[in-house]
Image (spheres, rainbow, N blue to C red):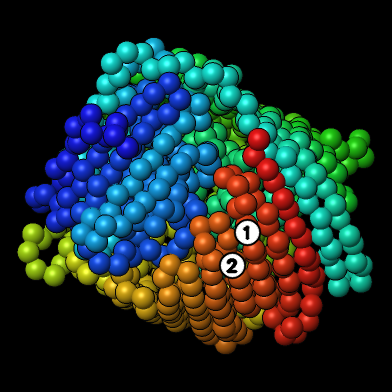
Amino acid sequence: MHAWNTVEAVSQFYKKFPNDIGAAKKQTEVKYLFDDKNLYFAFKVYDSGTAIIKSLKRDIGHDGNDGVAIVLDPLNQKTNGFYFVLSALNVQSEGQLTGDSEDGLSYSWDTKWFSMTKDYGNYWIAEIAIPLKFIRYNSENKNWGVNFVRIDAKNFEYSTWTRMGPNFKSYDLGYTGLMKWPTNPPASSNNVILLPYLTGGISEDKSNSQTETTGNGGFDAKIGLTSSLNLDLTINPDFSQVEVDNQVTNLTRFSIFLPERRAFFLENADLFAGFGIPPIRPFYSRTIGLDKEGNKIPILFGARLSGNLSPDVRIGVMNMQTGRKGDYAPENFSAFTWQKRVLKRSLIKGYFLNRENFISVEEEKKNPLDKYGRNAGLTFEYSNPAGSFSYWANYNQSMKPTIKDLNNYAEAGLSYNGRNFGFVLDIANVGKNYYTDMGFVQRISNYDAQRDTSIRIGFKHIYSEISYTLMPAKGKLGRIEARAENSIIFNPDNSFNEWESSAEIQANFKNSSSVELELNNNVTNLLFATSFTDGDPLPAAQYQYAQFGIGYNSDARKLFGWSTDFNFGQFYNGTVQSIRAGINWRNQPNLSLRLNAQLNQIQLPGKYGSTRLVLIAPRIEYNFSTQLFWTTFIQYNTQSNNFNINSRLQYRYKPMSDFFLVYTDNYFTDPLFQSKNRAVVFKISYWF
């Protein structure tokens, strides 16, 4: 394109990972242009040899693949933006960036953009066109934040255009450079996207010997009300194409937090889910359209308004209505959240949540707490301009019929993230009547195996973490990190409940392999009898136990890789031995084979019994092209007594338009291969 000859390239990329010492080994040049419809970027990436590409599948991200990325902050306020990643074989990934989520990046956001790559031997080029109508910005703002990232997988190195420390993510919005428009960017025309779908299939349930044929349809719509405010609508949404959850072995007394995988709930998720801390979340979208066992509840319709009302104010409004399924009554879920930017990188945030259950009068009499659940909260999050120091404080209130006290959750904390040294301190108090009908609180429900009932108990916690990182400039080691964590739990009357501490050291080598050592120590004041085996429950008492672990990951750049870790030691009044092993082989970029296996052996004295928990999870992925993918995922889990096969064929016949064919089959592990249910479904969608 002759237009590229009229603009000057930006270059001189700096090392970002595994350390920030000096310039990148292989340099990158970037040019950019614009017109009234698109932003254009051209990369010249100096490299030689076969590119490392782990997959041709969209949204695989940047880790482990030779590629480039663009960080865009259209509001230039260092709190929200977009991330566009392109591999050397033209595989696209795009995501939203936020300043207050756990890692700041979600690839759930999908949009249409255009790219191409070509290899010239000692360098390769990439050209990218990003339609302005698909991103949210303020047309009155001439100054945008921008950064460029180079992923050099062969040298296990990340580099960026703007210099930044290795203690920050390469897409951190606090370290963007300036992209200045000569005039105001063109106002984005109101944009409407329709994504209708059709599904059909056949399912067989062995528990009642019924076979059912299904057919359905619905649509999603995205309406750009302004250049920075978006309305999402969904009618009868279907998530049959979403991969099944990765099963885990749970050796704790509490429920496991499983990530959300449905794209409708993940776009702008920080507006709703960014309150609280990981084990205490007032909003958890898996409460919508899924029961506590993960079974699907039909969603009839939903709407969500999200984006910027002004450069400093973001809002999120959501309403979802579910239907009845068996004895499960219809429910309505509403959420309103807002964020106000203060200072340079700080936020004041608030929310109100409401779940209304359309239960009958008789059902309400049996359990009046099921009628509704409401939550409200306010949060202040401070971050210094460099992003190295932050503190936060929040107060949360729940509202339930007949409950008047012990129904709040308060928290405060601070952290420092320096180049070498870091620490976190967090203090929280959760009342026993703090209900989150639209959320998740990990520790509040305690199962009493003796009486076969769950008992709610509030708690207080003090969590602390300290870390120190070394990054040698020479030698085989790239990073050495030492970390110590401690969590102390108290009962509501301030009596001792539990102490959990760990110390670990991890060494990352410059060939991408790593080794880790970990020591854990626990003191548990078990309040209720608890079962871990088929033997008698452990009695309520105080237990002290320690465990040691060692792990290794091989060179991830090679076609064949492996990893393993061992964990052994005490477990309450008995012992535990755990081993996890994984092997990976790929015939890049088409075929990838992965096998993960885990064995946990718990041995308790005498009548308390023993158990062996086995989890085997092979995964086969074949990428025929950047449009056609086949994935088969198998999980054999004795803890959940389930053997699952999930096989999915995806054909992206046009940009953002897909055909899915999914086969799923479930069996018992005991008795082995006794069938539970199976289904074959298809889904076709089209992006208008």
Q: Position of residue 234 (x, y in %)?
A: 71, 35
Q: Which residue is mark 2?
A: 631
Q: Secondary structure at mark 2?
A: strand
Q: Position of residue 295 (x, y in %)?
A: 74, 56
Write the residue at 43% across / 34% down.
Answer: 130
Q: Which mark is residue 650?
A: 1
For disc 1, the neighbor class at 10 Å (few under 14, some 14 to 19, many from 20) is: many
**Image: 394 above or below 314:** below
**Is residue 284 toward the left or the right of residue 66 in the image?**
right
**Image: 31 above or below 668:** above
**Is residue 498 toward the left or the right of residue 221 in the image?**
left
Q: Is residue 350 visible?
A: no
Question: Observer-nearest residue: 539 or 227?
Answer: 227
Q: Position of residue 347 (x, y in %)?
A: 39, 25
Mark 2 or mark 1: which comes first in sequence? 2
Write the residue at 35% across / 68% down.
Answer: 520
Q: Secondary structure at mark 1?
A: strand
